[in-house]
Amino acid sequence: MNVNKSTQGAKELRSVRKETSGLIWQVILFSFAVNALMMTGPLYMLQVYDRVLGSGSEETLVALSILVVGLFLAMGVLDFTRGRVMAIVGARFQEKLDRRVFSAALQVSAGDPNDTGAVIAQRDLRAIRSFLASPVLLALMDLPWAPFFMAAVFIFHPYLGWLACGGIVVLVGLTWLNQIMSRRPQADSGQASEKAERYSEQLKNEAETVQALGMSGAGFDRWQTFQRKALRTAILTGDIVGAYGSITKTFRLFLQSAMLGLGAWLVLQGELTAGAMIASSILMSRALAPIEMVVGQWSMAQRYDEAWHRLSILLSRVPLSAPCTPLPRPRALLEVESLSVAPPGEQSAILRMVSFRLEPGQAIGVIGASGSGKSTLAKALTGVWRPLAGKIRLDGATLDQFDPDILGRFLGYLPQRITLFDGTVAENIARLDPEPDSARIVAAAKRADAHDLIVKLPKGYDTPISANGGRLSGGQIQRIGLARALYGDPVLLILDEPNSNLDNDGSVAVNAAIRTLKAEGKSVLIIAHRPAAIQECDLLLVLDQGMRQGFGPRDQILRELVRNHSDILPTPNPPGAT
């Protein structure tokens, strides 16, 4: 399932990586030069032991030493440069995909806030960037040069070459075992840590409820259960990776000693010079160094692989859409045709075959029992959830013909649960617009009857607030949320339980805003349980178990539902009343 789902996303990731192929080829070229210069040390030792010490020539030693200093300086500069270039490759890869991944994660999270891939998408992107800029990748680029170093060792003596080859086989086997043995614990550790972190964030976000209901102790115990599992799996993973790393390091050190021992025996047999003995030991050490690096940092390579796979799935779920042709500002004409909607990733529809039409200047109330599909309808109308079947049209155009950000400017949405963002009151009302219109901010606040309460705050519209609202009451948060929905002069206003936290004055303000919007030719959709919320509605849509049970003029529908609707529904205020 994952392979099929990730194909398109993997192709997109590869295409972005391909854009930096020119830089990667530069790194490969630098790696060629660096590994060639790695021969400097062995050749220097060979010349010193076999020529300088034999001839006693100080001039030769000085000349060789000066040459070696220059070669090592060149090697250091090239090695630093290739690391720097790979850091640029990683940074460009992340920069190119930041908006794409953020947008895809946002879209998936809107449908399912608990979706794992969406929650950690940015972290996965950073993991890929870290791997691209890490010494592990450079070590992998150095691995193909190991056979050349081994060939050089064979030139000195076949026995030394076979010993070095046997050592490489053992180290490669250890690398393979490390990958096999640590893959599952690494995945379990990541999942357990993520679950503990997500639960901790949930407790912090709901700190008020946790404290008020005396759930702190129980919440901590539950979090600690997740945390202990995460720690156990992390320790297990660390033990496995650490054990293989220690074995690899120990074996490499032993191999160097064995190389020197065998070389010394060959020198005693007259089959090798002392310089060749030292040079062959250095060459083998150079051949084994990238293998040891890969074994020691294998967890980073595994995180890269997992992150690449998860991002591939995420980007496949939210394909890159072609740019939409900009449409003119639509009229407030909403048409819903045989609409069926299911939660993202599911095929069982919550809303089934719902149709209605809302003309400019009209307001419609959506009523029904809990679980009847009212909030699902709101998510579909805002484009958060995509229809399984049917169409939603705004002034004749389906919602997918609008760019999501452009569509959002034409819509005003007040969700059932309002969330503010870290920033000032003005920034929240302006929908975090980097270039907000101050006049529109104040106008939206006045329409929501929030202006007076805002100017009484310590810094007025510039008062900083946190995501949970901080010092603001539920009613104040709801009014600021309503002002945010009204910002930018939307043509369609969607209100999900707008009166849930409002007092009578707040309800009057909402109704006044609805009357104003209707008079301006806008349309309003209100999801309601309280009768006061549908006071200004011209039409009513009744939902039951996801299906339309009634639709028509408000009073007619109410007469069909209850005998004495006038006792339940307050008489609408005349135009201009407050």
Image (cartoon, rainbow, N blue to C red):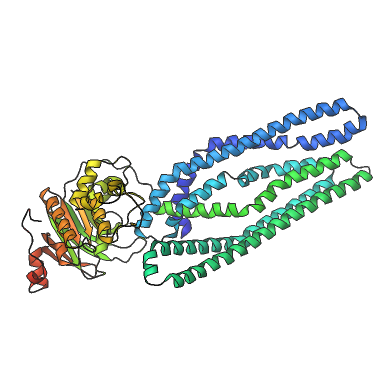
**Does residue 33 appear in this view?**
no
Which residue is farthest right? 269
| Left or right of 399 on screen, residue 39 | right
The front one of 397 and 241 is 241
- Up-down: is 285 above or below 80? below
Q: Position of residue 50 (x, y in %)?
A: 88, 34
| Left or right of 58 on screen, residue 522 | left
| Left or right of 533 on screen, residue 423 | right
Q: Position of residue 94 (x, y in %)?
A: 48, 44
Q: Position of residue 121 (x, y in %)?
A: 45, 53
| Left or right of 434 on screen, residue 263 | right
- The quarter of the picture where the C terminus appears is bottom left
Residue in the image at 85% along x and 40% along y: 276
Q: Position of residue 303 (x, y in %)?
A: 55, 54
Residue in the image at 78% along x and 49% along y: 164
Residue in the image at 66% along x and 36% along y: 32
**Does residue 506 appear in this view?**
yes
Residue in the image at 63% along x and 62% along y: 181
